[in-house]
């Protein structure tokens, strides 16, 4: 699925958000939900073009171990690799907020993959910060991953 199709799917899936919010706010949250879904999709599809489209050139990613990564390192993690097979990458318990031109997304990311014949699964709490703009309507400028906690 291409980025435009993914955005449309996210908009349709999140349609009930607009029922209780002013139209401009609802539209911003819907497109923000689509951008955040694109982040998960880029990993599971190993789509580095989508990753480059979504991630701001100056994005800062903090891993759950505290390691800082730039855009190049984050996109490299999305790339296909010999012997790597992604089973899934999804987000749950997602909360969306906008403040002017800034979007804040919190939730839990869950992913599973197979590498060198071994399966590994991870669950991390995340906070992603987006700015309006770019081809997807939002571009990720910061991402922080931490322990999953209880929820």
Image (cartoon, grey):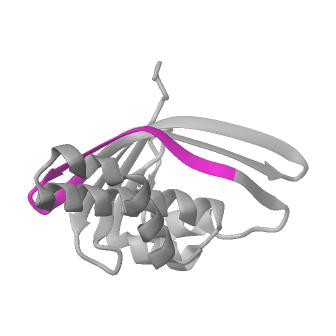
- Image coordinates of residue 73 in percent, x first then y, are 52, 65
Q: Give how far across and how far down residue 24 sits, in percent.
A: 12, 61
Q: Which residues are the magenta region?
A: 88-103
User: In the picture, residue 151 is in which quadrant?
Assistant: top left
Magenta stretch: helix, strand or loop mostly: strand
Residue 4 sits inside the magenta stretch: no
- Residue drawn at x 8%, y 58% as measured from the top left: 100
Residue at (75, 40) in percent of width and height? 120
Tell me: 116 left or right of 67.
right
- The residue lying toward the viewer, choosing from 117 and 36, is 36
Q: Residue furthest right?
A: 117
The magenta stretch spans residue 101: yes
Q: Nearer the viewer, residue 131 or 11?
A: 11
Q: Please say if 24 is above or below 108.
A: below
Q: Position of residue 13 (x, y in %)?
A: 43, 54
Q: Height in image: 148 above or below 28? A: above
**Among the 4 quarters of the image, the one containing residue 82:** bottom right
**Quarter of the N terminus within the rendering:** bottom right
x, y percent for residue 88 = 67, 50
The tally of labels here is 0
35 and 5: which is toward the camera: 5
Name which residue lies at 25% across and 55% down.
29
Farthest residue in the front direction?
A: 19
| Residue at image location 42% in from the left, 77% down from the top | 53
């Amino acid at each position: 699925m291409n980025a435009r199709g993914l955005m449309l799917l996210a908009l349709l899936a999140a349609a009930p958000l607009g029922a209780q919010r002013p139209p401009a706010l609802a539209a911003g949250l819907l497109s923000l939900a689509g951008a955040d879904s694109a982040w998960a999709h880029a990993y599971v599809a190993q789509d580095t073009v989508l990753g480059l489209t979504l991630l701001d050139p100056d994005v800062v990613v903090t891993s759950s171990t505290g390691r800082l990564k730039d855009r190049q390192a984050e996109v490299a993690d999305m790339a296909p690799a010999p012997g790597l097979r992604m089973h899934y990458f999804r987000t749950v318990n997602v909360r969306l907020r906008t403040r002017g031109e800034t979007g804040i997304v919190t939730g839990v990311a869950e992913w599973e993959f197979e590498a060198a014949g071994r399966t590994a699964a991870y669950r991390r709490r995340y906070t992603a910060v987006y700015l309006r703009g770019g081809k997807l309507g939002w571009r990720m400028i910061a991402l922080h991953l931490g322990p999953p906690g209880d929820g």
